[in-house]
Amino acid sequence: MSSISWFDWITPTNPVASLFFGILFTIIIGITVWVEARDLKTVVVTTITGIIVTCVGTAILNVIGFYP
């Protein structure tokens, strides 16, 4: 299993770090949207879209060989 380094938030060095920090930043954005909009539907759509984009982006980077 790959470990997460302190500098992975800048450029993830493995898929686990990419997923972790992508989902973490997505949750932070979801909280920000909640503070601004106070609409649960908007928050859920934003958060789910962010998680899907993170997973698809990580999968694509993994397939093309970005991670060592």
Image: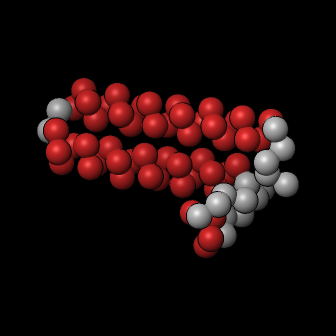
Which quadrant of the figure has residue 62? top right
Which quadrant of the figure has residue 6? bottom right
Q: Is residue 51 above or below residue 68?
A: above
- Extreme residue in the bottom direction: 6
Q: Where is residue 41 in the image (x, y as percent from the top left)?
A: 24, 26
Q: Quadrant of the N terminus?
A: bottom right
What residue is shown at x 16% (from left), y 38% (from top)?
37
Horizontally, is 66 left or right of 53 in the view?
right
Horizontally, is 60 left or right of 31 in the view?
right
Q: Where is residue 63 in the image (x, y as percent from the top left)?
A: 80, 36
Horizontally, is 18 left or right of 40 in the view?
right
Q: Quadrant of the C terminus?
A: bottom right
Which quadrant of the figure has residue 14? bottom right
What residue is shown at x 35% (from left), y 34% (from top)?
46
What residue is shown at x 59% (from left), y 64% (from top)?
10
Q: Where is residue 17 in the image (x, y as percent from the top left)?
A: 64, 56
